[in-house]
């Protein structure tokens, strides 16, 4: 006898349903809801079906033909949990807690990561879109109203869904324990793609896949929508959860106990729901249903459901065969946006050897089959609905609609600051106008090429003019691919050259965006000392699939004092020195294991996850080459990492240091608080003045901890406001050798002075510079307020000892 158990609301198969014909004859449905059960019982036969979260069903079979059984969803199980809360809860002599102890004890042998070698097939489907779009969009959007009429009313009962982004992948997944390696090769893919002139489709794919990562109840915490929610079977889960036994089940002649759990403190980032646990020597999870608690300290999340189903492999181990995560975002009781991810795993192989060549290259690779065509109905374990199939066609039609193109153009200008002209785009808008003490009003016209010109050759540049100094500035950079692929596609391999003539704050590196946007014009520590800089640079960049990259290059710069800056010889205090000319070669090694990023052309932003980033750079100054008047050696190293601390939130740690050999004017030494355009892991200081310290050997440290409301959630009244704690500290320690100390050496440059004769630049003492901050995040869901305090060197002139920093911070 064969059949299928189907969700009446969605039409999808129900995994793990229990089907019984008699007390001794029964089975359970597979990951797609299918079942098969042999029987010699005479007809008619009564078929009983149970599934977690659904009403019990009875059917009378007249013959052995295929049968479909439709089950109605119910929330009664959650109500049972609520009733059990009425009695006093205790971990002592509690059989539910004893059972969880066994589950935790046996996690290592049950989770797949404990197996030496694994390979399996995986199907992924991700959807993202709007909930209950207003009727006005269906009837009053002119040429694009057809897009708003493709409504799905079955996936989320009682809600209408309009899918905007949809992605499907068929992949082969591999992992091994020793040495630890993971690999996924995607060989079929379909996804919606908007006009790439205005929409960075790879970034959308990266961001949505980042928010909706694969989940497993055996992980200590489940990462979803940029948050860590503690698993109900985490090692320390008993501290945060309460447990109740609510039912026993028999599936495939095996017994399971259904266990309910709920948070001890509903405001913490925890789940409530049920798990089914095998009653044998393994104590493995058969099924898990996780729901976000409505009181949890999360923003804009009205509903979060995760369903996980595990089925026995031929070796008896329970393996994850289906996971589904559904999220509805909104404000208050109003739903706005939804997201859904379904992953189906099949054809597990836990014994075969995996060739070492499989793990070469990036952990995620796309090797699409030649016949990978749009709308091809490849072998999906879950058939697409009619609205899902139409989503692909509608997005393609939308891209060809003039009204939609105009809408994207305006959105791109507002969001990215560029106006697309086809092969070239003007921008960024925020740099078109700014002002400073040297240039007065600065007008800048710039832009960059797009893929419409070429994805293997890239140009960007600008011309700028200051109304006060009446000087023209310019910048031009170009990159040419050396591997036949896009200059921005990872792993990249390209040759880059740039030329620039502009004014900079001392210590700031050359680049397209040099920190002088319109908004930077209003900062409190405005610069008034500048270096007129003329520079050119050649670089060779090569990246490898293991996220190791090497950059080699040569840079020539000529710097002259501008504004209030004076470069006077330490040997003759009233004698200006010649312009500072340097020619240096450099090599940079960078390793960022498992790094993911958003990118646009040559600009990349790392998606910060748990993996560290290591960088080592060596510079060699070549004297007398192209009139260079200084020789030096410089070595710098940096490591940064995000620590995920389960219920305590996360912390970002950065440590960097370096040493410079040679006799140099202080603008060529290390001056903290100056950011590099390409270094997004640098330590920044809030209360340190520009040019305040100089050193030729140094160390910097930063620690920023966001506790995500862990402490405030325990305080009455506070926890209702969903406030979150944030604190941090930054340190700088540096030393200046005698040869570079203008008070001891007559071969360098005097520290510049103010009108009172006080030097702007200082030599740091025996104690490191130290500042700290503490604040409250998530005020009204959007504001962060921090108090920043300078903890030492407060007696130096013209320094701020503290400040209040208010900023917008949007986060879930």
Image (spheres, rainbow, N blue to C red):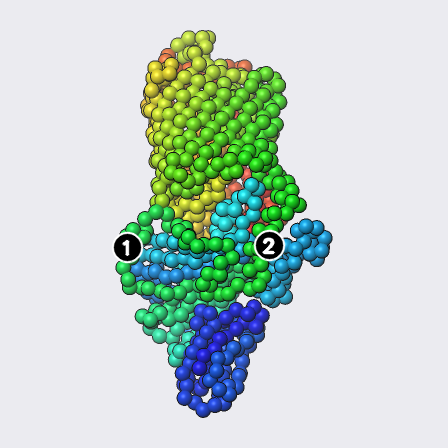
Q: Return the residue at label 2.
A: 394
Residue at 35% across, 57% down: 174
**Mark 1 packing: few (<14 Cα in 10 Å), some, or many (20+)?**
few
Residue 123 at least partly seen: yes
Of 23 and 521, which appears nearest the observer? 23
Relative to 737, is 3 above or below? below
SS assignment at label 2:
helix
* Left or right placement of residue 152 versus residue 622 in this view: right
Q: Where's residue 732, x and y in %? A: 42, 32
Q: Residue at x 49, y 26 (%)?
A: 476
> Residue 425: percent from the left, percent from the top?
56, 34
Identify the image quadrant of the N terminus. bottom left
| Residue under the image location 53 percent in, 59 percent down | 340
Can you give x and y, in whole percent of width and height, for residue 565 in the image?
50, 17
Mark 2–mark 1 CB contact (< 8 Å): no
Residue 20 drawn above or below residue 613: below
> Quarter-wise, where is residue 700 in the image?
top left
- Outermost residue toward the front in this view: 371
Q: CA distance from mark 2 to mark 1?
A: 42 Å
Which residue sits at x=55%, y=60%? 389
Rendered image: mark on residue 355: 1
Q: Secondary structure at mark 1?
A: loop
Q: Position of residue 49 (x, y in %)?
A: 50, 79
Q: How many marks?
A: 2
Q: Residue furthest bottom?
A: 42
Q: Nearer the viewer, residue 630 or 791?
A: 630
Can residue 437 be seen here? The reply is no
Between discs 2 and 1, the one toward the N terminus: 1
Nearest the camera: 785 or 77?
77
């Amino acid at each position: 006898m064969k059949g299928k158990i189907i969700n009446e609301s969605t039409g999808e198969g129900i995994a793990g349903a229990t089907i019984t014909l008699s007390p001794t004859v029964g089975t359970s449905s597979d990951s797609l809801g299918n079942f098969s059960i042999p029987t010699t019982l005479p007809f008619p036969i009564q078929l009983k079906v149970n599934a977690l979260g659904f009403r019990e069903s009875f059917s009378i079979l007249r013959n052995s033909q295929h049968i479909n059984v439709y089950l109605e969803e119910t929330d009664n199980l959650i109500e049972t949990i609520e009733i059990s809360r009425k009695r006093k809860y205790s971990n002592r002599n509690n059989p539910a807690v004893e059972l969880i102890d066994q589950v935790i004890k046996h996690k290592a042998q049950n989770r797949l990561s404990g197996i030496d070698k694994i390979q399996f097939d995986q199907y992924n489907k991700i959807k993202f879109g709007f909930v209950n779009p207003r009727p006005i969009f269906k009837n009053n959007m002119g040429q694009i109203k057809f897009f708003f009429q493709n409504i799905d009313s079955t996936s989320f009962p009682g809600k209408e869904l309009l899918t905007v982004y949809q992605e499907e992948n068929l992949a082969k997944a591999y992992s091994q324990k020793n040495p630890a390696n993971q690999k996924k090769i995607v060989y079929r893919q379909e996804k919606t793609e908007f006009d790439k002139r205005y929409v960075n489709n790879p970034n959308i794919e990266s961001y949505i896949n980042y928010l909706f990562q694969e989940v497993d109840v055996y992980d200590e915490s489940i990462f979803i929508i940029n948050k860590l929610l503690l698993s109900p079977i985490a090692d320390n889960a008993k501290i945060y959860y309460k447990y109740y036994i609510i039912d026993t089940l028999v599936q495939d002649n095996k017994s399971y106990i259904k266990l309910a759990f709920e948070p001890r403190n509903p405001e913490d980032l925890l789940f409530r729901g049920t798990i089914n646990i095998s009653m044998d020597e393994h104590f493995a999870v058969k099924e898990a249903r996780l729901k976000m608690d409505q009181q949890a300290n999360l923003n804009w999340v009205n509903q979060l459901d995760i369903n996980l189903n595990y089925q026995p492999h031929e070796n008896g181990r329970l393996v994850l065969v289906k996971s589904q995560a559904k999220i509805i975002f909104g404000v208050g009781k109003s739903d706005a946006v939804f997201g859904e991810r379904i992953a189906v795993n099949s054809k597990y192989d836990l014994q075969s050897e995996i060739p070492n060549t499989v793990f070469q290259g990036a952990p995620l690779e796309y090797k699409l089959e030649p016949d990978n065509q749009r709308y091809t109905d490849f072998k999906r374990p879950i058939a697409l609905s009619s609205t899902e199939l139409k989503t692909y066609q509608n997005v393609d039609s939308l891209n060809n609609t003039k009204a939609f193109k105009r809408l994207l153009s305006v959105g791109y200008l507002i969001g990215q600051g560029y106006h697309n002209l086809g092969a070239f785009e003007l921008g960024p808008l925020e740099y078109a106008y700014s002002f400073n003490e040297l240039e007065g009003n600065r007008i800048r016209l710039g832009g960059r090429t797009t893929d419409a010109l070429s994805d293997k050759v890239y140009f960007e540049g600008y011309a700028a003019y200051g109304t006060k100094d009446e000087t023209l500035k310019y910048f031009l950079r170009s990159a040419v691919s050396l591997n036949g692929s896009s200059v921005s596609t990872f792993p990249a391999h390209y040759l880059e050259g740039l030329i620039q003539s502009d004014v900079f704050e001392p210590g700031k590196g050359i680049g397209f965006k040099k920190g002088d946007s319109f908004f930077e014009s209003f900062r409190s520590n405005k610069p008034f000392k500048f270096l007129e800089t003329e520079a050119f640079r050649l670089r060779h960049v090569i990246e490898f699939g293991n996220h190791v990259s090497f950059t080699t290059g040569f840079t020539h710069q000529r710097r002259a004092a501008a504004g209030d800056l004076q470069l006077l010889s330490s040997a003759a205090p009233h004698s200006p020195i010649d312009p500072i000319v340097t020619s240096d070669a450099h090599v940079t090694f960078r390793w960022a294991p498992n790094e993911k990023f958003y990118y646009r052309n040559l600009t990349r932003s790392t998606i910060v996850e748990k993996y560290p980033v290591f960088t080592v750079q060596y510079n060699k100054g070549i004297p007398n080459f192209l009139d260079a008047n200084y020789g030096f050696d410089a070595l710098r190293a940096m490591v940064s990492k995000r620590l995920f601390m389960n219920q305590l939130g996360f912390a970002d740690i950065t440590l960097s240091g370096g040493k410079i050999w040679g006799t140099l004017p202080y603008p060529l030494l290390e001056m903290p608080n100056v950011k590099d355009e390409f270094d997004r892991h640098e330590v920044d200081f809030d209360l340190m003045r520009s040019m305040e310290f100089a050193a030729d050997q140094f160390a910097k440290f930063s620690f920023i901890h966001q506790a995500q409301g862990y402490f405030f959630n325990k305080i009455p009244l506070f926890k209702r406001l969903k406030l979150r704690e944030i604190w941090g500290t930054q340190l700088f320690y540096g030393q200046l050798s005698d040869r570079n100390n203008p008070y001891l050496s007559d071969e360098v440059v005097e520290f510049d002075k103010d009108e009172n004769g006080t030097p702007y630049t200082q030599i740091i003492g025996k104690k490191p510079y130290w500042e700290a901050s503490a604040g409250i995040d998530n005020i009204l869901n959007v504001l962060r307020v921090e108090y920043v305090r300078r903890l030492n060197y407060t007696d130096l002139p013209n320094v701020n000892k503290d400040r209040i920093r208010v900023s917008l911070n949007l986060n879930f």
